[in-house]
């Protein structure tokens, strides 16, 4: 696929509006939009953004949960040649302000009834223009299109920049293995401020199929009506548990699972219901999924998908390929992710039985409910409490979320139930839900009185003994 437009000669939605104008493209509740209607709506909203001053290469920040409005805004932002970045609306005002200071957004959009206000940034409205006008921006798939925040080993968020081309290459590779046809529908089940949520959008655009957006209260209903979804194991478990007693076949055909340990019993139950379960390994810098396989009893994560390459160097996973991001965004400039053509992931792995196995991270990050949890970032906040002298965050196994954070602390006064409640209330105002420790434990004297830097490995062993 040589050339500058290997996938589409024009905007993907315009391509499908020409090829299949009346085909159902987007569904939201009782509303269904054809590809012709999607293309027209995107152009209208893009014109509206241009009227408000949004220009090429400017950065549009969006702080909101998934909604139809957010989807329109992403597509319209790309259509005017600007760049989209999503921020987690569950973050505190202080966390959001820190991220915005780093990003230096040119415009912001957030729901009218949001609890936060940011006066330093022009606030956009999602409206068609007063009168129709042409958006003079041509389709350039190599242009920077989206930014996604991720956490590095230090806990400092990095803004990963992808083009339409890298994300379409990601979609192409996965769909070369997974059956997702033009008549199928994929539920937008993951947040659009994550690369996994954006990947769903690009798979939809690549295949010209149907995307389903649902209100949170209608999520379960929507999940029962689509053919494809990206889920964490808990969501799949709830779907299977809600099946009628007569075990009628479900509409769902294919599920991409992630975010937690996947029980074999769960995938076997899903396969019996006619649902093919996929698992894999991925990262923001590579446009989401890197390796994949049909889920089975093996703990491996499969092999590299098309358009990706993977190798091990001293046990560390290195990746490259057409899906590798353009770079990191700092000071309104895009910097390469590294000096080499191979990207060092900081993940450790090995090959076993002809598939990749993940041994752990080189840093301390863990996953809770599909969210990347960086211990050092939580520890830094916890140390801001006047009673806390030392703090360590470690994961414990959790049946629903995969893992949850526990705080091991050295405090000025004895760690009793009252102080635990105080710490819990303090963290509730500082970090989002999945980052809040589920328990607070006193640092054992045997580890805290040596005068030597405390070993996380020793703490993990101690925690395992008392759990």
Image: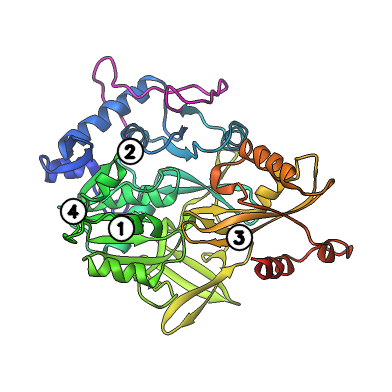
The residue nearer to you, when weighing 116 against 248, is 248
Can residue 57 be seen from the camera position used here? yes
| Magenta stretch: dominant secondary structure | loop
Judged by depth in the image, the label closer to the viewer, 1 or 3, is: 1
Q: CA distance from mark 4 to mark 2?
A: 23 Å
Residue furthest bottom in the image: 353
The residue pinned by badge 2 equals 217
Mark closer to the chain start, 2 or 3:
2
Task: Name the mark on residue 184.
Answer: 4
Q: Quadrant of the N terminus?
A: bottom left
Q: Residues within 10 Å of mark 3 (few under 14, many from 20)?
A: many
Q: Residue at x 61, y 77 (%)?
A: 314
Frontmost residue, 137 versus 421: 421
- Magenta range: 109-137
Residue ID for mark 1: 241
Mark 3 vs mark 4, CA separation in Å: 38 Å
- Are dots 1 and 3 in contact, CB under 8 Å? no
Residue 60 locus on image (x, y percent):
45, 32
Foreground: disc 4 or disc 2:
2
Asked if the magenta segment contains residue 331, the reply would be: no
């Amino acid at each position: 696929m040589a050339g500058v437009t290997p996938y589409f000669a024009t905007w993907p939605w315009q391509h499908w509006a020409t090829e299949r104008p009346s085909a159902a493209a987007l569904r939201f509740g009782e509303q269904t939009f054809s590809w012709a209607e999607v293309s027209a709506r995107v152009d209208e909203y893009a014109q509206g953004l241009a009227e408000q001053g949004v220009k090429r290469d400017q950065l549009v920040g969006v702080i909101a949960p998934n909604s139809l409005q957010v989807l329109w805004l992403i597509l319209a932002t790309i259509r005017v040649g600007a760049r989209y970045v999503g921020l987690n609306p569950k973050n505190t005002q202080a966390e959001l302000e820190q991220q915005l200071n780093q990003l230096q957004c040119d415009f912001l959009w957030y729901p009218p009834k949001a609890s936060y206000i940011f006066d330093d940034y022009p606030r956009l409205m999602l409206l068609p223009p007063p009168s129709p006008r042409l958006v003079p921006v041509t389709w350039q798939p190599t242009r920077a299109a989206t930014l996604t925040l991720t956490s590095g080993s230090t806990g400092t968020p990095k803004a990963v920049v992808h083009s339409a081309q890298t994300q379409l290459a990601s979609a192409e590779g996965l769909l070369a293995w997974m059956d997702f046809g033009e008549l199928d529908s994929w539920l937008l089940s993951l947040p659009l401020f994550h690369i996994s949520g954006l990947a769903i959008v690009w798979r939809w655009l690549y295949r010209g199929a149907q995307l389903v957006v649902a209100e949170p209260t209608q999520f379960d209903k929507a999940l029962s009506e689509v053919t494809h979804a990206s889920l964490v194991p808990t969501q799949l478990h709830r779907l299977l548990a809600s099946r009628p007693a007569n075990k009628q076949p479900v509409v769902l055909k294919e599920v991409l699972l992630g975010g937690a340990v996947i029980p074999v019993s769960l995938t076997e139950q899903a396969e019996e219901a006619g649902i093919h379960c996929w698992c894999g390994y991925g990262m923001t810098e590579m446009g989401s999924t890197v390796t994949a396989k049909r889920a089975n009893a093996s703990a491996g994560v499969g092999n590299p998908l098309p358009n990706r390459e993977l190798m091990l160097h001293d046990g560390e996973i290195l990746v490259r390929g057409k899906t590798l991001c353009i770079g990191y965004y700092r000071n309104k400039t895009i910097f390469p992710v590294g000096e080499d053509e191979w990207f060092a992931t900081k993940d450790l792995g090995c090959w076993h039985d002809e598939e990749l196995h993940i041994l752990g991270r080189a840093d301390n990050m863990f996953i809770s409910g599909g969210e990347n949890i960086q211990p050092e970032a939580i520890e830094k906040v916890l140390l801001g409490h006047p009673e806390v002298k030392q703090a360590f965050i470690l994961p414990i196994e959790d049946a629903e979320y995969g893992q949850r954070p526990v705080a091991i602390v050295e405090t000025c006064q004895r760690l009793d139930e009252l102080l635990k409640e105080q710490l819990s209330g303090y963290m509730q105002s500082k970090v989002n839900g999945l980052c809040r420790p589920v328990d607070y434990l006193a640092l054992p004297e045997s580890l805290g009185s040596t005068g030597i830097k405390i070993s996380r490995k020793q703490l993990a062993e101690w925690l395992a003994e008392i759990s």
